[in-house]
Amino acid sequence: MKKTLLATAVLALGGFSTSALADLAVAIAGPMTGQYASAGDQIRKGAEMAIADINARGGVLGEKLKLEVGDDACDPKQAVSVANTMVNKGIVFMHGHWCSSSTIPASEVYVESDIPMATVSTNPQVTERGLKNIFRIMGRDDQQGLVAGSYIAEKFAGKKVAVVDDKSAYGKGLADEMAKAMEGKGLKPTLRESITAGEKDYSGIVTKLKQAGVEVMAYGGYHTEVALILRQAQAAGLQLTVMGGDTMTNSELVTAAGPAADNVMFTFSPDPRKNPDAAPVVEKFRAAKTEPEGYVLYAYAAMQLFEQAATAAKSTKYADLEKAMRAGSFKTVIGELAFDAKGDQKAPGFVVYRWQGGKYDYAQ
Amino acid sequence: MAYALQQLINGLTLGAMYGLIAIGYTMVYGIIGMINFAHGDIFMVSAFIAVTAFTILAAADVTSIPLALTFVLIVSIFFTSAYGWAVERTAYRPLRGSTRLAPLISAIGMSIFLQNSVQLTQGARVKPIPPVLEGGIVLWDAPGFTVQIGWSQMLIIVTTVILMTAFTWMITQTPFGRQQRACEQDRTMASLLGVNVDRTISFTFMLGAALAAVAGVMVTVYYGVVDFFIGFLAGIKAFTAAVLGGIGSLPGAMLGGLLIGLIESFWAAYLWAEYKDVATFGILCLVLMLRPSGLLGRPEVEKV
């Protein structure tokens, strides 16, 4: 009896995997739930639109694309199990993960299973481990930190600056790079602190900043904590200018921090929405009531990257795809994409933005 | 000195909130001997109810702050108590009398259920409310540093003191308090003596939820943002507070909450903020090694 059951189960599994392979499965993975779920939402919206568009053009190599969505909640352990699930689903391409701390362990699974991945994770370690399957369509924290740190050292010379991070792989990496860049330009941070992400009360650190007379906070971490720090700083009578990384693009920062968000600056790749080639796609997103901010267009571009690489290679086999991605240059909504030997984007270019009245634009 | 005073105020505010949530853990443990892991999420639900109530008030153009706060508190306490009752009824009562682990697993399931249902119905984004109680008073204008206490901080501390007093009176002086303590000591004997055990347990859950609701409203007013995830960390910290003070002991939960709030803010103020949680849990370990039943807990006597 037991054996019959087992056999049925095996058969059922077999049936599942073949049916999943009817279309070409591509995947996204990121925090679809958990405290950073709004970023996952952006990725999903971008990828869904891209796949609908690609399928409307006839798919890739005559096969329709099917999107698999993996939810890692930015938890490294969950990321590995998501990666295994995706491998079992037979995906040929992965856009993800989002948090560096998820991308790094998950990539070990994908490289073993020969799955190419395009990620927006910015921690240098993502591409520094010599993995062949990773392509980064975003800049790196050391570049991002250099731009942010130099900007602070130039614009806020002589002011007291605190460097704060949230102890995550992304946040600490970015904050360290910002501090290094500032010191390189002769501005020594007054304070170096870490906070615990996910809490609500940051009055302790705010009071500490106030005591030290800090005016500028260079922050490595995510937008949710910055919003709370700003709100609590305002309540404590502390005017704080914040310099952060690419995660501050999230408009949730403005909803949560209110007018205090006007004091937030951050580095991000040049706004893809301003790319003239992206205009039709941007229009399409807006018509669908989605503002293509943050990671939306990156997810769209990742799918375009797969489409163009597969078309150029005339194959979706790993070896062919990898070769095509490394050699080629791809026209996407975020601009021209080309990769170096490590898998980093060749022309990353970060610029400094500033939130103003609920919108962000290049800072002067 | 001024700096220390400011951190003391921060710590008291934080500790008051932990204490309010911790009572819910400790009461339920006292009466049925289980850890209600869904309690942190009940607190989260109450914060969402508060946000909804504030939004309704804003739409109705109510500008009087005391009136608005009273309304939000009543609404939130009412609905959150209903949640507390429903959780006990659906997830714990059917398992009463089974193994000790069963309700524990059920509680974790309930916690995940509440978190995800709020995420699905309310969305994953943070819900902000415009500042309700802005400003405060300057306590001390020391050179180089002004000590401020915000109106919302004052509200939290004062409300907590009033509630704790009322609560202690209720447990020690009223008929319900007597029944509650009777159930805590021996459920079978209490039921033989005519105490409606099921009703008392239900009411205990509602009471815990009501206190969590007050904390939820305070958090909404103080921090201005809520999301579906706030219950997790707050729950863990409050649970730690309950254990530190001695789980099962009501004054212990209050003391534990205050201690954790103070340890957190002073450690972050003078030592390394990144090791704040290490300090909190390190002190918890130390206390449990020296006094296994917590600061004010009574050692459990095996009933024969």
Image (cartoon, coloured by chain):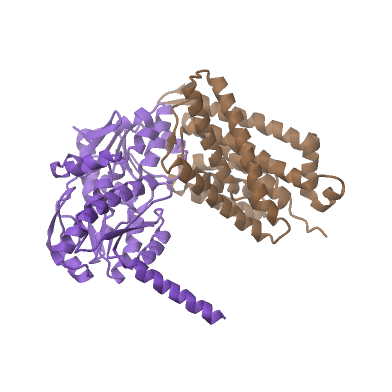
* Quarter occupied by the N terminus of chain A: bottom right
Q: Position of residue A339 (x, y in %)?
A: 16, 58
- What shade does chain A have? purple
Which residue is pictured at 69% across the width and 52% down the height? Answer: B93
Please state if A340 lies on the left or on the right of B16 as rendered.
left
Using the image as rendered, state which of residue A325 and residue B303 is in the foreground: A325
Which residue is pictured at 17% across the width and 61% down the height? Answer: A309
- Residue B189, visible in the rendered structure: yes
Using the image as rendered, state which of residue A8 and residue B55 is in the foreground: A8
Which residue is pictured at 57% across the width and 54% down the height? Answer: B108
Position above or below: B291 against A240 = below
Position above or below: A125 against B78 = below
Q: Position of residue A354 (x, y in %)?
A: 25, 34
Position above or below: A314 against B231 = below
Report the residue that reaches farthest toward the top.
B64
* Quarter occupied by the C terminus of chain A: top left
Please state if B135 lies on the left or on the right of B282 as rendered.
left
- What shade does chain B have? brown
The quadrant holding residue A131 is bottom left
Using the image as rendered, state which of residue B260 and residue A300 is in the foreground: A300
